[in-house]
Image (spheres, rainbow, N blue to C red):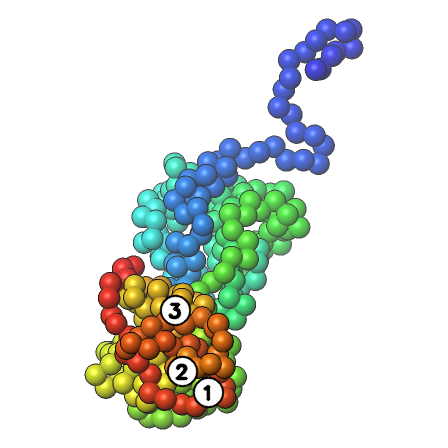
């Protein structure tokens, strides 16, 4: 209750306390809309992953690291993120800025460091959708902030662009912070493994070596394309002469985008492949020394994940039942 100097009761007014900013209704409206469209962040994360993969163009270049890009390509990353977000969510074009979301002009900005977005003069006083991502860290963030004077550093670069000051960075309304980015496993492999995988001039042999060396880890379609460097890259994973055929005598099976494969992987306690993902593992027939290890039945026998001391034996065939959809 508020009381004036002569004891009269005054109505409560929503006035911020000193040092505390009043809620920004446009920020909250845009945030609510984006979270309604993408409650878990999977759609934004997918758009960022797609942007990285488009920029690296591994299928045609064999590149998989940010450091392999040319300077001009790196500067194009923000534009690709902006485009792919608009494609994913079908945002309307803004009259002044990139998007119009729930009637609010929003500028989309991307940077390699959190909060270090370059803000053009036309965005002054308006909302920013700021994004950051790191392929090596496997993380991304997205937040909203108003680019008004109290949130901006006074200096500008030669393009008259400015950056957020400490107050502005502290005031970012994070939608997602350090969310997981679909892994590009090639970034995290040891150099000896990378050298062994890319040593051959044959796309099929490179894919074989990928699944031979990288087991128990989900491998995306784009990683396969980068290693194969061919138009029909997923053919290199399948049976009928692909990696499944080549690696079967070594006891290695490749789980892919079939419901039966997902169920088998889960029964063995392994990560379940999603649409466009694959995962290899060496199997062994269940023997007494395996005890109560998790197992699956294939070809009329029980199979377990092979231990290092299990002898190599031909792997069973995996039934391809129920194709997963995107």
Element carrying mark 2 = strand
Q: Position of residue 111 (x, y in %)?
A: 51, 61
| Of the image marks 3 and 1, the number of the one nearer the N terminus | 3
| Of the image marks 2 and 1, the number of the one nearer the N terminus | 2
Crowding at dot 2, Cα within 10 Å, few <14 / some 14-19 / many 20+, comes out as many
Element carrying mark 3 = helix
For image coordinates 78% across by 10% down, the residue present is 5
Depth check, mark 2 against mark 3: the one in front is 2
Give the residue at mark 1. Answer: 310
Q: Position of residue 67 (x, y in %)?
A: 49, 77
Callouts 2 and 1 close, C-beta under 8 Å = yes
Residue in front for this viewpoint, 61 or 264: 264
Q: Is residue 155 left or right of residue 146?
A: right
Q: Position of residue 218 (x, y in %)?
A: 41, 71
The residues bearing labels 3 and 1 have C-alpha atoms spaced at a distance of 19 Å
Give the residue at mark 2. Answer: 284
């Amino acid at each position: 209750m508020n009381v004036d100097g002569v004891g009269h009761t005054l109505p409560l007014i929503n006035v911020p306390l000193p040092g505390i900013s009043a809620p920004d209704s446009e920020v909250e409206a845009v945030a609510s809309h984006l979270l309604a469209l993408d409650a878990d962040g999977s759609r934004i994360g997918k758009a960022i992953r797609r942007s990285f993969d488009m920029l690296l163009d591994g299928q045609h270049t064999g590149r998989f690291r940010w450091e392999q890009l040319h300077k001009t390509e790196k500067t194009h990353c923000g534009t690709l993120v902006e485009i792919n977000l608009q494609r994913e969510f079908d945002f309307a074009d803004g009259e002044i800025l990139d998007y119009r979301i729930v009637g609010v002009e929003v500028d989309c900005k991307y940077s390699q460091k959190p909060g270090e977005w370059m803000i053009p003069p036309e965005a002054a006083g308006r909302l920013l959708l700021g994004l950051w991502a790191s392929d090596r860290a496997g993380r991304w963030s997205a937040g909203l902030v108003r680019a008004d004077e109290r949130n901006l550093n006074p200096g500008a670069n030669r393009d008259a662009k400015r950056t957020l000051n400490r107050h502005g960075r502290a005031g970012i309304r994070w939608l997602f912070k350090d969310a997981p980015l679909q892994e590009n496993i090639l970034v995290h492999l040891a150099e000896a493994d990378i050298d062994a995988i890319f040593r051959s001039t044959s796309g099929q042999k490179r894919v074989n070596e990928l699944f031979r060396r990288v087991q128990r880890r989900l491998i995306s379609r784009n990683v396969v394309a980068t290693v194969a460097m061919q138009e029909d890259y997923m053919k290199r994973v399948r049976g009928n002469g692909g990696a499944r055929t080549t690696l079967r005598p070594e006891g290695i099976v490749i789980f892919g985008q079939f419901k039966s494969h997902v169920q088998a992987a889960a029964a063995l306690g392994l990560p379940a492949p999603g649409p466009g993902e694959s995962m290899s593992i060496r199997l062994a027939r269940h023997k007494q020394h395996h005890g109560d290890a998790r197992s699956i039945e294939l070809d009329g026998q029980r199979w377990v994940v092979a231990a290092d001391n299990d002898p190599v034996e031909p792997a069973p065939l995996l039934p391809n039942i129920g194709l997963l959809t995107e």
